[in-house]
Image (cartoon, coloured by chain):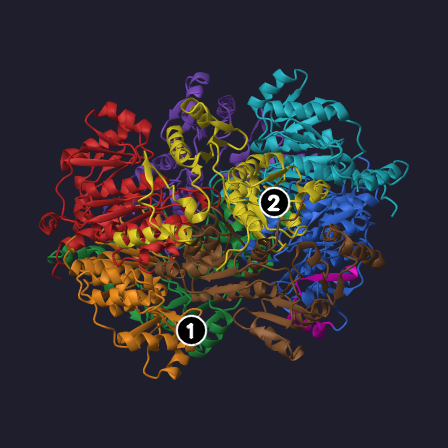
Chain colours: A purple, B orange, C green, D red, E brown, F yellow, G blue, H cyan
Amino acid sequence: MLEVLDQVRAGAVSSAEAAGLLADLPYAEIAHAVGTTMIDHHRELRTGVPELVFGAGKTPEQIAAALRELARRAGGALATRVDPDKAAALRVLIPEIVIHELARIAVLGVPAARPPAASIAVVCAGTSDLPVAEEAALVAEFLGATVVRISDVGVAGVHRLLARLDAIREATIVIAVAGMEAALASVLGGLIDRPLVAVPTSVGYGVSLDGLVALAAMLASCALGITVVNIDNGVGAAVAAVRMARLAARPEPAP
Amino acid sequence: MLEVLDQVRAGAVSSAEAAGLLADLPYAEIAHAVGTTMIDHHRELRTGVPELVFGAGKTPEQIAAALRELARRAGGALATRVDPDKAAALRVLIPEIVIHELARIAVLGVPAARPPAASIAVVCAGTSDLPVAEEAALVAEFLGATVVRISDVGVAGVHRLLARLDAIREATIVIAVAGMEAALASVLGGLIDRPLVAVPTSVGYGVSLDGLVALAAMLASCALGITVVNIDNGVGAAVAAVRMARLAARPEPAP
Amino acid sequence: MLEVLDQVRAGAVSSAEAAGLLADLPYAEIAHAVGTTMIDHHRELRTGVPELVFGAGKTPEQIAAALRELARRAGGALATRVDPDKAAALRVLIPEIVIHELARIAVLGVPAARPPAASIAVVCAGTSDLPVAEEAALVAEFLGATVVRISDVGVAGVHRLLARLDAIREATIVIAVAGMEAALASVLGGLIDRPLVAVPTSVGYGVSLDGLVALAAMLASCALGITVVNIDNGVGAAVAAVRMARLAARPEPAP
Amino acid sequence: MLEVLDQVRAGAVSSAEAAGLLADLPYAEIAHAVGTTMIDHHRELRTGVPELVFGAGKTPEQIAAALRELARRAGGALATRVDPDKAAALRVLIPEIVIHELARIAVLGVPAARPPAASIAVVCAGTSDLPVAEEAALVAEFLGATVVRISDVGVAGVHRLLARLDAIREATIVIAVAGMEAALASVLGGLIDRPLVAVPTSVGYGVSLDGLVALAAMLASCALGITVVNIDNGVGAAVAAVRMARLAARPEPAP
Amino acid sequence: MLEVLDQVRAGAVSSAEAAGLLADLPYAEIAHAVGTTMIDHHRELRTGVPELVFGAGKTPEQIAAALRELARRAGGALATRVDPDKAAALRVLIPEIVIHELARIAVLGVPAARPPAASIAVVCAGTSDLPVAEEAALVAEFLGATVVRISDVGVAGVHRLLARLDAIREATIVIAVAGMEAALASVLGGLIDRPLVAVPTSVGYGVSLDGLVALAAMLASCALGITVVNIDNGVGAAVAAVRMARLAARPEPAP
Amino acid sequence: MLEVLDQVRAGAVSSAEAAGLLADLPYAEIAHAVGTTMIDHHRELRTGVPELVFGAGKTPEQIAAALRELARRAGGALATRVDPDKAAALRVLIPEIVIHELARIAVLGVPAARPPAASIAVVCAGTSDLPVAEEAALVAEFLGATVVRISDVGVAGVHRLLARLDAIREATIVIAVAGMEAALASVLGGLIDRPLVAVPTSVGYGVSLDGLVALAAMLASCALGITVVNIDNGVGAAVAAVRMARLAARPEPAP
Amino acid sequence: MLEVLDQVRAGAVSSAEAAGLLADLPYAEIAHAVGTTMIDHHRELRTGVPELVFGAGKTPEQIAAALRELARRAGGALATRVDPDKAAALRVLIPEIVIHELARIAVLGVPAARPPAASIAVVCAGTSDLPVAEEAALVAEFLGATVVRISDVGVAGVHRLLARLDAIREATIVIAVAGMEAALASVLGGLIDRPLVAVPTSVGYGVSLDGLVALAAMLASCALGITVVNIDNGVGAAVAAVRMARLAARPEPAP
Amino acid sequence: MLEVLDQVRAGAVSSAEAAGLLADLPYAEIAHAVGTTMIDHHRELRTGVPELVFGAGKTPEQIAAALRELARRAGGALATRVDPDKAAALRVLIPEIVIHELARIAVLGVPAARPPAASIAVVCAGTSDLPVAEEAALVAEFLGATVVRISDVGVAGVHRLLARLDAIREATIVIAVAGMEAALASVLGGLIDRPLVAVPTSVGYGVSLDGLVALAAMLASCALGITVVNIDNGVGAAVAAVRMARLAARPEPAP
């Protein structure tokens, strides 16, 4: 079977559809073990987005090794969920690392050139939602998009949101970040005609249930056309938004 | 013991504190059994609001008997949750009954004169929320309040709400009725300085969980000062609002 | 569009209540009451998508009236959640109506010309998910997109999915529809580089909890970049996908 | 207030973007960024209540800055959810700050004069509920209301409650604070004719689910007219009660 | 093998430990198949309570056969959850059957003489809780206890409960039946020194969650010493109460 | 009103029904404030059980003060939920205190003589359930009951339980303590004819949901006659069991 | 790519590993559309088990067509979840069909010869669990296993279970079917050394939550080595058990 | 009774069915108390698997004592859930102990010879799932099975899984370990014809609900024949798989 696959691969090299076919090849041959962490250099060919290191549940040493291996190949690498203790340890392990404290993100090196992408607005309801919003913004920038940050426009003062509406409408894709009852998504969803990715956050207490209510409220929104990601999932929202933003910047592929 | 109570009651008639004292007297002597339904004629003295017949889980015969008993004493009586089948049966049992179909309410007779109350705005997010909103409005009117109805101002088109804001602000108390993600309560809560009673409805599907998400979202609102009642509980919102509205219409009682 | 709005706004300048009324008036002027249902002709200007009639909780008469009012202005109108009984009644009320039984959709007239949109693949896990998938497909077509339907590719036989992968990749946007454990979204999410909108369905029993598990599994997916809508919300997925698909078909608007 | 708003609006008339900017500008002009925290000096004009600093999730430095900025304009400022560590740090940062340890509240300066308000009774079921009750009481006092505190009247000894009933009835508004099964709200709701705001607390264990059962029990109460706020939300109950209490102290505004 | 058992049973008559030993004998030899329903004549020896037919999920024919088989041996038999349709069918199948409509109970024959039991008070919060309360009362009477019924003493009018307190205290065991927020159990639990078995009912709507909140509130009660059974489980409460009531009527067995 | 009450109290002193009547007197006159903790010396007259100090959420100083105040009047006092840190602090504050480490209980002085009570078996499924079982056992002994402890008879080895069945049957009341799936209660419930109080524990992980599944399984038991208390509520089970055990030791009171 | 696959397939024909390789081939070429139902004739090669028709959510016509298509190829076919109405319709459509009413199963034709399998005991707690147990038993027999049925051995009378233990131990695999608190699985799990597949059923009410508690209790069992399937999933348990039973009947394949 | 049991035991010694009969003997005679932990040396006779020490909730001293007691009799003993602190303490208490850090397992001595068992593949979705997978693998090896470890084959890159499919198919039993949406189980379930035990893990955040969604998704899988254990229950999966694997290695026992 490996032979067959190798033949397919050989043939694919000379093909104009190479990237598409390569995307189907097994990981195992390309992945490199870094300690107990497997690095998937091949992922960007398949999904358009490189592997991003999920820092939660990894030691600083594991994060550092993964970032180094990814940056070695791709020029730059990014890790999310890097809490202050891990950030401090990373600074010792890799002195040249750049830490974004609010977003809990670590970046090593310079991101590779990526496909052009239209602009993304990251709209944030309250101060407490900023870490998630900033995670989304930094990841989108790392993936090559231009990001506009619009903060503190929660609907408890809906005029704040209306005052920033023109700025939001200048972006091609909108990411809305909100906790508690997350009404921002619904209000915004009725005011714009662009794709809107909603990110619920775990901000709140009591009946907020660590973000479950914000999540459900966004999904139950009376405004059609909103799509939603997991609670506090800024990185997932960014990847989704960048996929959309690249569409606006490139022509439709011929069938 | 009956004697003692009668004496107290007799004495209370001439007393300025009569209503307060009477409110503490046992029910049992005043209640009249109507079939299996107990009627509490004394409730209005104690809580300011007469017994309202909860039609769900009662037969048309039980509803009719309760309405007749209450109206006999108080002039008028009201039943909620009267579905179309029960309404039809009630019309046969009591030809003079008045049925409000949308609100699923039946009224017999003319309501007693009640304490003055300031005006109440019943603000409703969508067409499907109207039955609950109308239940609130009709109960509030039955209890003596003036009601302003403002419908179809859901936040998926927040301009609809802003356009009606002056009308809402003319009322002293606001009831906000919304299902799905129930963002109306939060948006309204940040725009007015009056008491705001929020009523979640069971409108929605899937993740709406029959109104639980609307309920939780209202409770988790980022706007301070909103208070909430049970799902689809228009009658409870009306009673709460009327209690508040009476405050605006009467001077503070001397201690 | 900006011109129209500016003109409306300009007229408002001479009003003493200008600020409040201005931005809000457009909606109020255009909305027409159709019985108890409000029709929002203005919505397409604001959000790029016309009002779609949500048939659940409406009578056939209400649906018919809403479709007629919308079609009168826009040429064509569409209602979702039209169950067989309502469909039969609608056929009597509007003989020329077109009913799509599987998708529970009713269409009146010919849809208006709409902005160009890239192609959308609607990928469906099992036979029982087809009604939701077809709802998504028909709404996307109504909104002007080209739709490719790919069915019965659930992951219990992952080769079925792999065999259709080339067809899926020819589309610009992918909608994945699945119930039960909804693993289709994750598998697909790791194989494509296009925006992927996941629609959980209520298909399943027992621990499936009427689609809540499918919904949560899609949100918890290990594949980055998936966005999700409410359970059985084919229409919402279609609106979101069309917004994205229009991006691929038009240049980025100049700021 | 209308004058100020009218003047702002008048100035906007000469702007080409008048409609959008007008109603929204007030907020933007008055809000001042204090580090990452936005201060909304305008909120009291809009909602009758000044911004109150929510101390959870903020650093002592952020709380101190917010209190100073608010107090600079308004004379006094208040922060909630100030745990002992933050309180100690605040005492270093602002030596003149006043800490209420039980209520976890910090107050800086002297509250501004506010509209007259009728008296509020804060009724508390058990010793463990006192922090939430005291949060409600102190916030209500900060907002200008007279507060009567009635503690340890849980229904496991209903005579304790009956013995204090006269004191409770002397207040115009009642806040009931209870955890566990929260039966206090129902019992009290059947005994008084005043607005009753119920605050569930997270007191309890096992099946109490961190206050969710207390919350649901209050909402499901058989006593009509109770309204409810989020778990442990003393500050929200106080704001709601003060809005109601101001009604009793002022005449109904002419329409 | 029946012989062996009969011998043991015969021998047990003269033995002080007879009942205990018999209780350990396998069922299978004693059970008689009645269609698909197995009848466990031996259960009363083991647990002190005969098999009671659970009518939900059984056909009228199955219920009739089970009642006949049980009554044949024991003189009387009882079935619960007999809805009106099944009751009508049972009346045809067994003309001498006695149907208690409110309690949905069918009784055939005369109950066997049973051990003496002290009196049980069945205390019920509201009219809608009566079917469950009556199920408890009738089963307790069938098992040989004297029952006092006290209805409509919900805590929304706590004086109703206080007025009946003497009657309640005359009983040795108390069963409290309540739905919605079920505060009756807590209030009663703080007023009596007898065993208190609480039965939550599914009465309520919205946040009541079909009785789950009543159940949880009873379990979370601040009054020590309350024990609880499943939602609407009147029969289980009766069995538990009868076990307790027999203790009061017999001396402690010598070790 | 105080006068009336005083007269009743005076009259009650010479009455045989004194205890019953006294039980209705307001707390407030008898309760003594100990710091922020109210001590209810009157509770035992009303409910048959003295106040037991719930140590969770209290400081060692508060626990010590409460124990001293209670012991001063009654001879002995008991506190539950005394974790190791609080126990160490209590030993410093009250050197003569007795700490039961496994049960997390502190006892001061010698319990007062209490009404006679039959024996109680505390049956425990696994080693991890022992703290809750021992809490139940010690509280029952403190309240005057004889306790038999039977441990490690979980149903994963049902023969362990059967081997101890004779010992269990020698007790008059049975308390069953179990976590995880809590099948002990069902198995035991089908083997004995005595009152059975089931205590779910929070022992388990994953799907055990901190004891909620054990609780629900006990409530859903197929064995009739089991009653249940809150998760880990050993003290509540003991109070309920002692109330029952006293019945077996005293004759039914004359009406 | 199709060519490559064809070549692989060609080579596989002559290979001893043919079945294994074939199992990887795409469905699409083998599946036959039967109306809207796709039939996967290839599934048995891949997973060892043929497609079984899930009757819920299919019309009688769809079920009939699927059964005919499957039986045409394989000799016999089976459908589950065939309710009485569908069964009646199927009898008209296919007169020779065999309906198992209790199990809600329809069988057409004679099952194909299948690999040998060891015996399976289907152990059932109560009468109400029989439909699920019989579904498991019939499917296992259809797949070639010998089945022993042991019913009515719920743990409320644990001696019933012990009396049948020898019969249970004669089987190689055990399926335990139980609802309510599902303690049967735990008790059985501690008594046997064979694989035990537990099937929770939706039998129960109130806190049983339609089988969720039975499911969770089985998963939380203190007996190691139990594995669990979805609620009421008799067919899934049968397929799992047959896979295991075939192991006992064939030698371990050489690596 | 003891005599009878002794006789049975005596007879059993010479019997070929000895193991089976012995399995029914009461624990109590064989169990040895080690401090508060009971050791059940008899369990292996009854269930085929020795007692495994569950380290969570035990002190290092208790774990050490249990391991020593078990190893003294059986040669080797194993403890699970030994976190790093306990591992360090165990190393001091028993210097010869072997700690498997990733799996949090401690092993003392050499496992006893056990029945032959076929091979087991432990297939793991992601790096974070490795501790649970390794727990399963080590326990299976301790119980005598051969284990193949296959890691990092999550479905976000389904080709990784396909590439390892031959290796997986060489095993007789498959354990699939996955968190988040746990799609690995469904995909694998459609590709193999062997028994598949699925282990959900608590890996994930937000809507993953600590593994509940992975658990539910595995149970709701569209692939028939998967069985599931509790969240993070590697040891339970191993015991179940070993029971199955022994079947493949031994002939079916004669009835």
User: Whole-percent x and y of residue G145?
Assistant: 80, 53
From the viewer's side, name the closer residue of H53 and G111.
H53
Give the CA separation, mark 1 to mark 2: 52 Å
- Kindly indicate whether the residue at mark 2 contacts the one at mark 1 (C-beta within 8 angstroms): no
**Which residue matches tag 2?**
F182
Tell which subunit mark 1 falls on: C
**Magenta extent:** G74-94
Q: At numbered mark 1, what does the secondary structure look like: helix, strand or loop?
A: helix
**Considering depth in this image, is B121 or C130 the residue closer to the camera?**
B121
Give the quadrant of the C terminus of chain C.
top left
Amino acid of disc 2: Ala
Q: Position of residue H149 (x, y in %)?
A: 68, 31
Report the residue marked by disc 1.
C60
Which is nearer the eye, B105 or D154?
D154
The amino acid type, in three-letter code, at marker 1 is Pro
The answer to whether one can see residue E78 in this image is yes
Asked if residue F225 lies left or right of residue D97, the reply is right
Instruction: Find out whether residue G50 is within the magenta segment.
Output: no
In the image, residue B14 lies at what x, y percent?
A: 17, 66
Residue C204 visible from this viewpoint: no
Could you say which is closer to the camera, residue D243 or residue C106?
A: D243
Q: Residue at x 70, y 32 (%)?
A: H51
